[in-house]
Image (cartoon, rainbow, N blue to C red):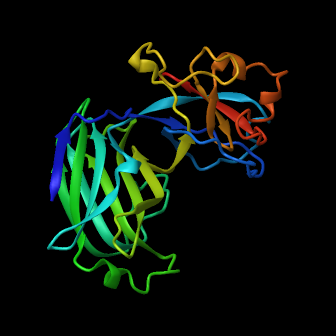
Amino acid sequence: MGCAASTQGVQTQYGLVQVQSSGTRPTPSSHAHQSQQQQQVRPVPGPGPGPQDGSLATAPLVRSLVSLHRDSLALEKDEQGYHLTFRFGALTAGTATASFVVSGGDEATDGAGLVAPIGVQASTECRFEAGTGQTQTGRLFLCSDLAASLQGLAGDKSKHHAMLDLRADDSDPKAVTAQRSFLKLSADGNGEVQVEKQLVQCGVLVRQLDALYGTMPNPRAGNSEADGGDCVICLSNPREVAILHCRHVCLCLTCAQITSSTWSFQCPVCRGRVAAMVGLKDA
C-alpha cells in the first residue's frame, strides 16, 4: 500500500477550461475512435446568451498540480483483500485517498472547495512526493470481500462504489490542486474499474471534468513534431480547437476561423451540429 514514482510515460499537466454555450445538447451520429484523450473543466453556465453557433472562443490554460491517468485504474487482489491501483502525475507533494462505498461529495461548488462525503464505509491514504516529468503509482486498500460489500448497491444512485482523491499540498489559487474521481467497480473482482464522474478544484471553485476526443498541444512545451496531431482540414497545422458539444479536437485555429466552411456548423468528424468552438490561450 502506498505511492511510488517511475519514469513510465509523462502526462501533460494542463487542462482546458470549456466555454459553455446556449442551446440544447445534440447527440452526434457517431464518435471516431481516438487513442488519446485530454480533459477539460466544465464551468457552471452563467446567465445570459452563450456564443452563437460556430463561434470561436478561447479559454486559458489551467495548470494542474495533480492528474490521474484514467486508463491505469485497476483492482488487485491479495491475501488481505482488494486494492485499488492507479498511476498519476504530480507537480508537488500531496496525499492520495481511496474511499470505499461513498455517499455524497459529488457536488460542484463555487466557494467551498471539494465537499466532504456524507458517508464512507472505509478509507486509506498515502503520501506522494513531487514527480515532475515522472509517472507515479499508487496502491490503496479498499475491502476484504468485494462481492459482499457491493451487494445491494445495484441501482442505488445515492452511493458510489469508490472515490479517489488526489490532493496537492500547494494551495495555488490559479491551479488545479485537487482531483476527485468517482469509480464503479466490477463486483466479480475481475479488475475492471470505470470512472463515472470526476471533479477538480481550482482555488475554492469545483468543476466537473470531461474528456476531449483527441489531444491538444501544450503551448508551453515548445514546438514538437506530431504534438497533438494534424488538423483534419489542412493536414498540416496542429489541432488546437475543440468543437462543442461533441468535444472532438480536430481543427487548427486558422481553419476554425473560416466562417464560410461546412465545418463552421458541422463537425468534420461526427457530423454533429457545432454549437461553439474553443481554442487554447496561453495564460
Residue 170 pos. (x, y %): 26, 40
Left or right, 145 with respect to 281, comes to left
Q: Is residue 139 above or below residue 155?
A: above
Q: Nearer the viewer, residue 40 or 271?
A: 271
Residue 136 appearing in the image? yes
The residue positioned farthest toward the front in the image shown: 190
Q: Quadrant of residue 84?
A: bottom left
The residue sitting at 50% across, 40% down in the picture is 37
Left or right, 259 with respect to 82, comes to right
Q: Is residue 107 above or below residue 91?
A: below
Residue 34 pos. (x, y %): 55, 39
Residue 231 pos. (x, y %): 63, 22
Q: Nearer the viewer, residue 26 or 115?
A: 26
Q: Looking at the figure, which quarter contains the N terminus?
A: bottom left
Q: Nearer the viewer, residue 118 or 32?
A: 32
Q: Quadrant of residue 243?
A: top right
The residue sitting at 71% across, 42% down in the picture is 21
Q: Is residue 227 above or below residue 52?
A: above
